[in-house]
Amino acid sequence: MNNWSGLSFIFFMIMSALFYSHDLYGQKKPKGMVKIKGGPPENFDVFYSRFHQDSIFQLSRLKDPLLGMKKINGQETPWTLDNWDYMTTKIQDFDASHYKTKTKRKKKYFEQEIWSENLEYHAAYRFELHGSKWYLVFAYKEDSSND
């Protein structure tokens, strides 16, 4: 009988170890958890301010090729790094007496649109989070004030 209780104890310990290890290694990660490559995403507000203040940083955060175009006096031109018009005014800083603005902000993108009442100026931009960094991926700018 003494031998039987020893075997029962060993059997109990082995089964406990199996259940414990299955519990540790067999669990799936909870839904909604995503592994972020390259660290946590950068803060959009910090990025957005720096993007409008630092021209070298701005060029480094244009997705190449940048989608969209500029249309000046009816002439359409695709964007390149050589003809890029630096963005220096944040959307909240546009003069509301001359321009209308619209924004849409989600977790992984930010869209902004600016236009004048007389429709001589219209611009739309889209920023997206790629990995852990924000980039400008689309830019459209139309200026027909010199027609």
Image (cartoon, grey):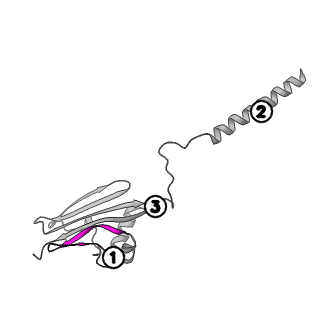
Residue 19 x %, y %: 68, 34
Residue type, mark 2 in image: Met
Residue lying at 62% horizontally and 39% vertically, measured from the top left: 26
Q: Is residue 45 magenta?
A: no
Residue 131, image quadrant:
bottom left
Q: In the rendered image, which quarter contains the C terminus?
A: bottom left
Whether the residues at callouts 1 and 3 have beta carbons within 8 Å, the answer is no
CA gap, disc 1 to disc 2? 67 Å
Residue placed under numbered mark 3 in the picture: 132
Residue type, mark 1 in image: Leu
Q: Which mark is residue 57?
A: none
Residue placed under numbered mark 2 in the picture: 13
- Magenta segment boundaries in residue numbering: 64-79
Instruction: Choose mark 1 or mark 2, whichever is in front.
Output: 1
CA gap, disc 1 to disc 3? 23 Å
Residue lying at 85% horizontally and 24% vertically, measured from the top left: 5
Residue 95 x %, y %: 19, 68
First in sequence, mark 1 or 2: give its number: 2
